[in-house]
Amino acid sequence: MEKVTGIGGFFFRSKNSETLNEWYEKHLGVRKVGIEYEDGSWWQDEGPTVFGAETRASQEYGSSEYEWRINFRVRNLEAMVAQLQSSNIEIRVEETIYPNGRFAHLRDPDGNPIELWEPAGTDANRPADP
Protein backbone atom coordinates (compact mmCIF):
# COMPACT_ATOMS: atom_id res chain seq x y z
CA MET A 1 0.00 0.00 0.00
CA GLU A 2 1.23 3.51 -0.79
CA LYS A 3 1.20 5.94 2.12
CA VAL A 4 1.92 9.59 2.64
CA THR A 5 5.43 10.31 3.89
CA GLY A 6 4.76 13.42 5.97
CA ILE A 7 3.04 16.76 5.98
CA GLY A 8 3.77 18.67 2.78
CA GLY A 9 2.10 21.90 3.82
CA PHE A 10 -0.17 23.51 6.36
CA PHE A 11 -2.28 26.41 5.12
CA PHE A 12 -4.64 28.66 7.04
CA ARG A 13 -6.18 32.08 6.68
CA SER A 14 -4.89 35.23 8.34
CA LYS A 15 -5.95 38.86 8.24
CA ASN A 16 -2.28 39.82 7.82
CA SER A 17 -0.52 36.81 6.32
CA GLU A 18 2.77 38.56 5.56
CA THR A 19 3.23 39.72 9.16
CA LEU A 20 2.18 36.33 10.54
CA ASN A 21 4.57 34.46 8.21
CA GLU A 22 7.39 36.73 9.40
CA TRP A 23 6.44 36.04 13.07
CA TYR A 24 6.63 32.26 12.54
CA GLU A 25 10.01 32.60 10.83
CA LYS A 26 11.48 34.97 13.45
CA HIS A 27 10.24 33.26 16.59
CA LEU A 28 9.86 29.57 15.65
CA GLY A 29 12.26 29.20 12.73
CA VAL A 30 9.58 28.12 10.25
CA ARG A 31 10.85 29.43 6.91
CA LYS A 32 8.19 31.51 5.21
CA VAL A 33 6.90 30.64 1.77
CA GLY A 34 9.08 32.04 -0.98
CA ILE A 35 7.91 34.30 -3.77
CA GLU A 36 9.35 32.10 -6.53
CA TYR A 37 9.45 28.30 -6.72
CA GLU A 38 13.25 28.51 -6.69
CA ASP A 39 13.07 30.06 -3.17
CA GLY A 40 12.40 26.62 -1.71
CA SER A 41 10.38 25.54 1.30
CA TRP A 42 10.88 24.96 5.01
CA TRP A 43 12.41 21.54 5.68
CA GLN A 44 11.46 19.67 8.84
CA ASP A 45 13.65 17.35 10.81
CA GLU A 46 12.57 13.74 10.60
CA GLY A 47 10.58 12.68 13.63
CA PRO A 48 7.24 11.59 15.02
CA THR A 49 4.04 13.33 13.98
CA VAL A 50 0.61 12.93 15.56
CA PHE A 51 -2.35 13.22 13.22
CA GLY A 52 -5.70 13.19 14.97
CA ALA A 53 -9.15 14.73 14.84
CA GLU A 54 -10.54 16.17 18.06
CA THR A 55 -14.11 16.87 19.05
CA ARG A 56 -15.43 20.38 18.58
CA ALA A 57 -16.41 20.37 22.25
CA SER A 58 -12.77 19.98 23.33
CA GLN A 59 -11.64 22.98 25.39
CA GLU A 60 -8.23 21.50 26.17
CA TYR A 61 -6.30 23.63 23.68
CA GLY A 62 -8.34 26.80 23.46
CA SER A 63 -11.79 27.99 22.66
CA SER A 64 -14.03 26.19 20.20
CA GLU A 65 -13.85 29.00 17.61
CA TYR A 66 -10.48 27.65 16.46
CA GLU A 67 -10.71 24.92 13.86
CA TRP A 68 -7.11 23.76 14.19
CA ARG A 69 -3.99 23.80 16.28
CA ILE A 70 -0.50 22.88 15.27
CA ASN A 71 2.07 20.97 17.27
CA PHE A 72 5.73 21.64 16.52
CA ARG A 73 8.49 19.28 17.68
CA VAL A 74 11.44 20.97 19.40
CA ARG A 75 14.80 19.56 20.47
CA ASN A 76 15.10 21.58 23.68
CA LEU A 77 11.86 22.91 25.15
CA GLU A 78 13.55 24.98 27.87
CA ALA A 79 15.73 26.79 25.32
CA MET A 80 12.75 27.47 23.04
CA VAL A 81 10.67 28.79 25.96
CA ALA A 82 13.50 31.12 27.04
CA GLN A 83 13.88 32.36 23.46
CA LEU A 84 10.17 33.14 23.16
CA GLN A 85 10.00 34.77 26.58
CA SER A 86 12.95 37.00 25.66
CA SER A 87 10.72 38.33 22.86
CA ASN A 88 7.88 38.94 25.36
CA ILE A 89 5.79 36.09 23.96
CA GLU A 90 3.50 34.57 26.57
CA ILE A 91 3.99 30.82 26.85
CA ARG A 92 2.72 28.24 29.33
CA VAL A 93 4.81 25.15 30.04
CA GLU A 94 2.82 22.15 31.25
CA GLU A 95 3.97 21.03 34.68
CA THR A 96 3.25 17.38 33.92
CA ILE A 97 6.00 15.47 32.17
CA TYR A 98 4.31 12.78 30.10
CA PRO A 99 5.77 9.44 28.99
CA ASN A 100 5.95 10.83 25.44
CA GLY A 101 7.57 14.13 26.44
CA ARG A 102 7.04 17.70 27.59
CA PHE A 103 4.68 20.33 26.21
CA ALA A 104 4.21 24.09 26.17
CA HIS A 105 1.42 26.25 24.75
CA LEU A 106 1.29 29.68 23.18
CA ARG A 107 -0.69 31.62 20.60
CA ASP A 108 0.45 33.31 17.43
CA PRO A 109 -0.39 37.01 16.89
CA ASP A 110 -3.74 36.02 15.32
CA GLY A 111 -4.65 34.04 18.47
CA ASN A 112 -4.21 30.59 16.90
CA PRO A 113 -3.15 27.87 19.36
CA ILE A 114 0.37 26.43 19.07
CA GLU A 115 1.72 23.49 21.02
CA LEU A 116 5.44 22.82 21.37
CA TRP A 117 6.55 19.25 22.08
CA GLU A 118 9.90 17.88 23.18
CA PRO A 119 9.51 14.15 22.43
CA ALA A 120 10.65 11.51 24.93
CA GLY A 121 10.14 7.82 25.55
CA THR A 122 8.94 5.78 22.60
CA ASP A 123 8.50 8.90 20.46
CA ALA A 124 12.16 9.93 20.91
CA ASN A 125 13.34 7.18 18.55
CA ARG A 126 11.97 6.23 15.15
CA PRO A 127 10.45 2.76 15.12
CA ALA A 128 11.17 0.30 12.32
CA ASP A 129 8.63 0.31 9.50
CA PRO A 130 6.18 -2.60 9.78
Image (cartoon, helix red, strand yellow):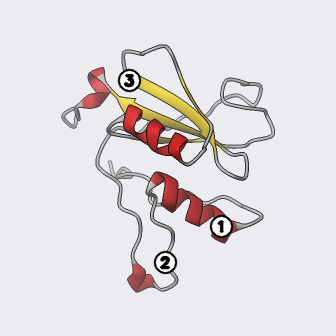
Secondary structure under tag 2 reads loop
Q: Position of residue 102 (x, y in %)?
A: 42, 24
- Label ID, residue 19: 1
Residue kind at label 3, given as amino acid type: Gly
* Residue at the disc numbered 3: 101
Q: At 73% from the left edge and 67% from the top edge, which residue is drawn? A: 16
Image quadrant containing the C terminus: top left
Secondary structure under tag 3 reads strand
Secondary structure under tag 1 reads helix
**Residue 41 lies in what quarter of the image?**
bottom left
Query: How many numbered marks are there?
Result: 3
Q: Earlier in the sequence, mark 1 or mark 2?
A: 1
User: Which one is in front, 113 or 130?
Assistant: 113
Residue kind at label 2, given as amino acid type: Gly
- Label ID, residue 34: 2
Q: Position of residue 117 (x, y in %)?
A: 44, 33
Q: Position of residue 12 (x, y in %)?
A: 66, 58
Q: CA distance from mark 1 to mark 3?
A: 31 Å
Vertical placement of residue 97 versus 39, above or below: above
Q: CA distance from mark 3 to mark 2?
A: 33 Å
Q: Residues within 10 Å of mark 2 (few under 14, many from 20)?
A: few
Q: Earlier in the sequence, mark 3 or mark 2?
A: 2
On the rendered structure, is 18 left or right of 65?
Answer: left
